[in-house]
Amino acid sequence: MNSLQLKLLVSLLLLTGLGIFGYKAFVLGFPLTPEEQTRTWNVEARVSFEAQDSPVKATLQTLNRLPRFVVTDEYFISDDYGLLRGMQAEDGSGLTNDTDAENAIAVWSKRSAKGKQDLFYSARLRPENNSDDRTWVHPTDIPRLVDPQFTPAEQAAANSLLTKVGSESADIETFVPHLMQLLMPPSDNTDAAYLLRGHPGRLGAVNMAVRLLHFSGIPAQSVHGITLSTSNNAPLSHWLELYHDGAWHMFDVTQGAFGTPGDFVPWWRGNAPLASLKGGDNLEVTLSVAPVSVSSLKNTVEQLNITEPAIMGFSLFNLPVQAQATYRVILLIPIGALLLVFLRNVIGFSTFGTFMPALIALSFRETELLWGVCLFSIVIILGLSVRLYLEHLKLLLVPRLACVLIVVVLLMAGISVVSFKLGFPRGISVSLFPMVILSMTIERVSVMWDEMGAGKAIQQIIGTMAVAVLAYLAMSNQYIEHLTFVFPELFLVLLALTMMTGRYTGFRLLELIRFRALLKR
């Protein structure tokens, strides 16, 4: 492979790895740190009423398609009531098959019930991403103009009221506030009082404003919801949502001004009530809201399992939990390998074996660093002693390696038993060392000892231990473990960096120090 091909391949790997990483981090919302927390909201509606010892049917508006949130973990606690879930049009008519309808409802029913009844609806709101984006998402469909169903007398009152508001306003930004001022209680306008008869309160005023806006040719609908703040009896807020001159306008009825909702969560749209009841009296609905902090990673995974199941189907998070735990460890090995490549090719460390330091570092994760270094040193020293004795027996290569392997296994077992007897259970973890690699290392140390002397062999052992310790520090870092498991595409970046390091042919750092006297000349 020539230099151009290598550059193209490295560039492709970097672009692919970093591109997928950026998409997952900044679009899908995967957290960059393991301890990052996300605030979710638990919302509960309690429906209470007195049943009349007759068939009971209770209907409750439930959460559906919220801007900036995903509704998960929905529970309907209703004892022995039957439950139906479906969609409902904005006018409050019965269940519909129209999946584009804005409202979702739950219908509890029972053949016969008597006395106090309590039904519960609980859900969790998960933010769609970890940003503070508060952009309000309007319905995709523009509200259609509908007949407000005014009687002749109501039509006359509506004409009079709209004429008055129209004469006192200049545009939509002044028309709607004037209209709401006349409709909001207490109002001394006789036309408004007539239109609102039988529909008292803020909810009646909002629904009447929607009818009057439709009567004026302006598509509009009411939005009812809650503000996200801790409360055991969260009040309902009502907003107007109207479409005029090709743009959506949100009007805060409480503040009497146009604006975009911040922490407001729409519960349902239209003039249907929050709950309705047949076969009972004294219907009451209590809404509760409470924040809950959860892991951002857990929140993102659970949210994407609902909204992006195709993406999550090819994720490590889709594996069984045991397999995920295994890969959390396996994915750290390339980190140790890259560090080893850098330390050998750029710094100039000498080690026994190519991957032995990375595997030893992996064992240190289980034994802990101090115990790992001690146990590793004991096995190497004892094994090397036996190996030097075997040298006098003049054995052939393969039988000699087999003898070393057997001795290493016996040493590991002996260290485990003795340390356990002495009250050091951590010594049992010596069994996690890769015994074949240890045997080969002992053999190579012995050969080097014979050929190049004890000093060179000890120097190489120290280099191996130093690289293993550095690799352990990198592989035990919780941020690196988090990034490798959540963003495995970063291994394409590691592969590119390894390729680039593999073409490095310059001086190593330790060589510059070693030959500094020559360089000064």
Image: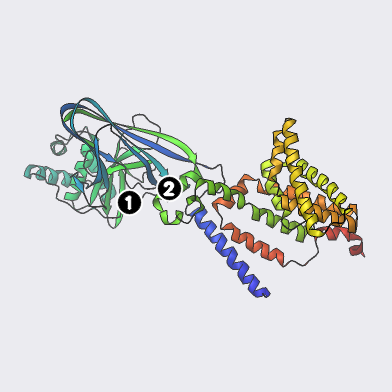
Q: Mark 1: give few (<14), some (14-19) or many (20+) Cα within 10 Å.
A: few
The residue singled out by tag 1 in the image is 138
Q: Quadrant of the C terminus?
A: bottom right
Q: Quadrant of the N terminus?
A: bottom right
Is residue 133 left or right of 200 when viewed as pictured?
right
Q: Residue at x 80, y 52 (%)?
A: 442
Q: Position of residue 181 (x, y in %)?
A: 24, 39
Q: Mark 2: give few (<14), some (14-19) or many (20+) Cα within 10 Å.
A: many
Helix, strand or loop for disc 2: helix
Q: Give above or below for 322 relative to 200.
A: below
Q: Give above or below for 214 relative to 39.
A: below
Helix, strand or loop for disc 1: loop
The residue singled out by tag 2 in the image is 303
Closer to the chain start, of discs 2 and 1, is 1
Residue type at the position of mark 2: Gln
Is residue 425 left or right of 236 when viewed as pictured?
right
Q: Nearer the viewer, residue 7 or 521?
A: 7
